[in-house]
Image (tube, rainbow, N blue to C red):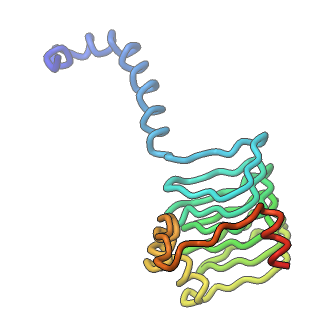
């Protein structure tokens, strides 16, 4: 296999069209495997909590909470988000109402419209961006510490575990949901 290339430049020139086709096909798989990112397309609407370990591009509508604490979140120009976002880096090109909490930085592009709170050690606002809210750039702020501390991760892991049953007397039978609701009022 290696001997063919050592035979001379004439053979490598003859094989150059075939070899030039290979490098073109090889890079796309490696670049797609490097990206490790997910996309919420323009026609997608999500209401709830998003958690994961990859980068995220939001072009659609998201309402709730986005937690990608070791990754980056980008709200594209067509993205409309009404959520609290926790990520390593956050870039906003679209619309957001909520809180942005980043352990490294937040970038607000000129096409962005934001109403809410930004908490990050580094913040960049491009000329033309619209922002209404507050910015906290103190790297020692409690919001950053609680969002990205090991204890916050431990408490979220505990919250995922089912609660153990109480060790008290057996519960008394309850009536229908309607009766219980009346009893509480």
- Residue 93, quarter of the rendered image: bottom right
Residue name at image x 28 percent, y 15 percent? 12
Residue name at image x 59 percent, y 89 percent? 141
In front of the other: 17 or 162: 162
- Residue 105, quarter of the rendered image: bottom right
Q: Is residue 110 visible in this depiction of the protein?
A: no
Q: Is residue 181 above or below residue 9?
A: below
In front of the other: 117 or 10: 117
Mark count: 0
Residue name at image x 77 percent, y 47 percent? 45
In front of the other: 80 or 130: 80
Q: Is residue 64 left or right of residue 151?
A: right
Q: Is residue 56 above or below residue 109?
A: above
Q: Is residue 72 left or right of residue 29?
A: right
Q: Is residue 103 visible in this depiction of the protein?
A: yes
- Residue 30, quarter of the rendered image: top left
Q: Is residue 7 above or below residue 111?
A: above
Q: Position of residue 43 (x, y in %)?
A: 78, 40
Residue name at image x 81 percent, y 76 percent? 183
Q: Is residue 68 above or below residue 135?
A: above
Q: Position of residue 26 (x, y in %)?
A: 41, 28
Q: Looking at the image, which residue sits at the far left? A: 3
Q: Position of residue 70 (x, y in %)?
A: 49, 64
**Where does the C terminus fall, quadrant-wise?**
bottom right
Q: Is residue 114 left or right of residue 17?
A: right
Q: Position of residue 158 (x, y in %)?
A: 47, 71
């Amino acid at each position: 296999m290696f001997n063919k290339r050592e035979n001379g430049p004439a053979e490598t020139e003859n094989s150059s069209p075939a070899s030039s086709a290979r490098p073109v096909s090889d890079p796309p798989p490696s670049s797609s495997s490097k990206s490790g990112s997910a996309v919420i397309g323009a026609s997608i609407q999500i209401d709830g909590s998003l958690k994961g370990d990859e980068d995220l591009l939001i072009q659609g509508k998201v309402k709730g909470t986005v937690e990608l604490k070791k990754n980056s979140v980008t709200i594209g120009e067509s993205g409309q988000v009404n959520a609290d976002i926790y990520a390593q880096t956050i870039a906003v090109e679209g619309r957001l109402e909520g809180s942005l909490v980043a352990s490294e930085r937040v970038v607000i592009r000129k096409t962005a419209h934001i109403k809410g709170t930004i908490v990050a050690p580094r913040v960049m606002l491009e000329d033309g961006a619209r922002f209404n809210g507050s910015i906290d750039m103190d790297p020692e702020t409690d919001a950053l510490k609680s969002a990205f501390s090991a204890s916050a991760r431990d408490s979220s892991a505990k919250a995922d575990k089912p609660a153990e049953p109480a060790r008290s007397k057996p519960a008394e039978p309850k009536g229908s949901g309607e009766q219980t609701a009346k009893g509480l009022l």
